Image (spheres, rainbow, N blue to C red):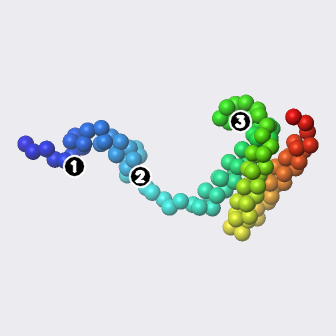
Amino acid sequence: MQENPAAPESRGAEAPEAAERSEVGGQPEATAPPDVPALVATCFSLLAARAWAAMGLIADPVTGRVERNLDHAQLAIDAAGALADVLRPRVGDAERRELERVLADLRLNFVEQKSRPG
């Protein structure tokens, strides 16, 4: 009997890995096109969370420690603001108000943290 190079048993360890990538629950995985506005909104949220942590107002989600680095906070806030500029014309009124609220909260807290020693 001749070995079939395309058969799963002849590919060894690659077969389960390939199956995991193409099937979920025994069904082929459907691939949807990326929702770019949602991706940008996620980046905005990640930067906002990073800014809160860099201001020392919440624990760093990775280390669990509260540390201040106002330079990093400023960069995260500025980057979140740039993403908000891109998102504003692409989202509804409620989402736009939420972007503005988050940015205003970040900026006010940054000014307050900058005026505090330490």
Look at label 2 and name its amino acid: Glu
Q: Is residue 105 visible?
A: no
Q: Which mark is residue 84?
A: none
Helix, strand or loop at mark 2: loop
1 displayed left or right of 64: left
Q: Quadrant of the C terminus?
A: top right
User: Residue at point 65% right, 35% down?
Assistant: 62
- Give the residue at x 73% y 50%: 76
Report the disc number at residue 6. 1
Q: Which residue is mark 3?
A: 60
The local secondary structure at tag 1 comes to loop
Q: Is residue 66 visible from the viewing direction of this image? A: yes
Judged from this view, the residue extending furthest toward the left is 1
- The percent position of residue 115, horizontal first and vertical second, equals 92, 43
Label 2, on which residue?
29
* Residue type, mark 1 in image: Ala
